[in-house]
Image (cartoon, rainbow, N blue to C red):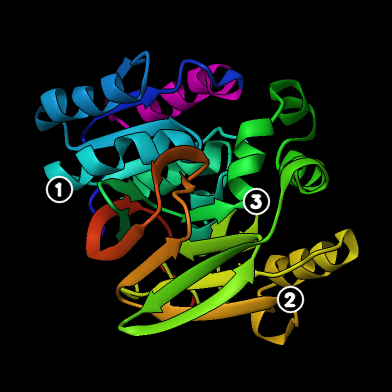
Amino acid sequence: MAEKPRSILLLANPKSGRAAQGLDSALAAFGDAGIAVEREAPGDCDALAETIRSRADAFDAVVLAGGDGTVNAAAEALAEIRKPFGLLPFGTANDLARTLGIPVGAAAVRTIVEGRTRAIDLGRVNDRVFVNAASIGLPVSVAQHQDAALKRRLKALSYFVTAVRAFKCCTQRFTVWITADGVKDSLKTIQVTVGNGVHFGGGLKVGTDAEIDDGMLDVFAIDADTLPHLVQAAFAVRFGLHRTSRYTRTFRGHHVRVETRHPRPVNTDGEITTMTPAVFSVERAALKVYAPPAPGRS
């Protein structure tokens, strides 16, 4: 059942230039719809989460103006308060918005005003949460070598450019043990990605059948030792053809454990937050978000 929020707490990422440009028109659109808005710009991730915990009770909903990093910083607090949130996708990759079919610009405001919500899952790895995906290997190198100027200029394409650079300079195959719902396997890989959502890395897909509300984790590993092999694997991942590529292995499960010979960093929604061994789980319907209905549902 759709219910338009009457009041919202709008939290903007102060580091997002796109958010600064689009907020004035968004605020005007909310005002035209009769929605009272209070705007804040917390300075960092901890401040964002604390603002949600301390202030959200006074509002019908929280609206985040930013990208996937902003959503990740807010996710655990949003799950705790159990209130719906809206998303104005002003980030670089906007993978959650892509997964949920949330449009950019004024149409994103209309999605919130219409008041339709979807319940979505929240992934957890060790003591951290993630909305889209968590990765080990190459995506960690990408996060470490991402250039801010390149990111502003090329937007989502910058992830692929940085991945090629990272592959050439500092990516080596490593042994990994993956246990999905009690079934254990080992392999050599340059990347393991565990997905809660559908998209990550600027439009790549975590699995052929991935959904953000199915209670499942979709896992894939890439074994590519040359740049042409990496490009072929990237093509498969981009179009959800993981099962047809000779350079990818796939797994699915409600609970997943990833072990490596030595501790390795884990990238969650674009930020390095924890280390292996990594224990993954899913919290069903942990978040309620303003979004169009899923395809095939009304």
Looking at the image, is 88 positioned above or below residue 275? above
Residue 41: image location, x then y, percent: 37, 15
Q: Name the residue located 76 percent from the left edge and 39 percent from the top edge.
A: 158
Q: Do the residues labelled 1 and 3 touch (CB within 8 Å)?
A: no
Which amino acid, mark 2? Tyr
Q: Which mark is residue 247?
A: 2
Left or right: residue 204 compared with residue 289: right
Q: Residue 35 carries which label?
A: none
Q: Do the residues labelled 2 and 3 touch (CB within 8 Å)?
A: no
Is 271 inside the magenta-drawn segment?
A: no
Residue 18 visible in the displayed image = yes
Residue 102 visible in the displayed image = no
Residue 74: image location, x then y, percent: 31, 36
Give the label, 1 or 2, closer to the camera: 2
Disc on the earlier residue, 1 or 3: 1
Which amino acid, mark 1? Arg
Q: Which of 294 and 249 is in front in this view?
A: 249
Q: Nearer the viewer, residue 218 or 249?
A: 249
Which amino acid, mark 3? Leu
User: Which segment is the magenta one?
Assistant: 18-38
Query: Please, what secondary structure does the residue beneath circle 1 have?
Result: loop
Residue matched to label 3: 138
Query: Please, what secondary structure does the residue beneath circle 3 have?
Result: helix
Looking at the image, is 239 positioned above or below residue 296? above
Q: Distance between the residues labelled 2 and 3?
A: 14 Å
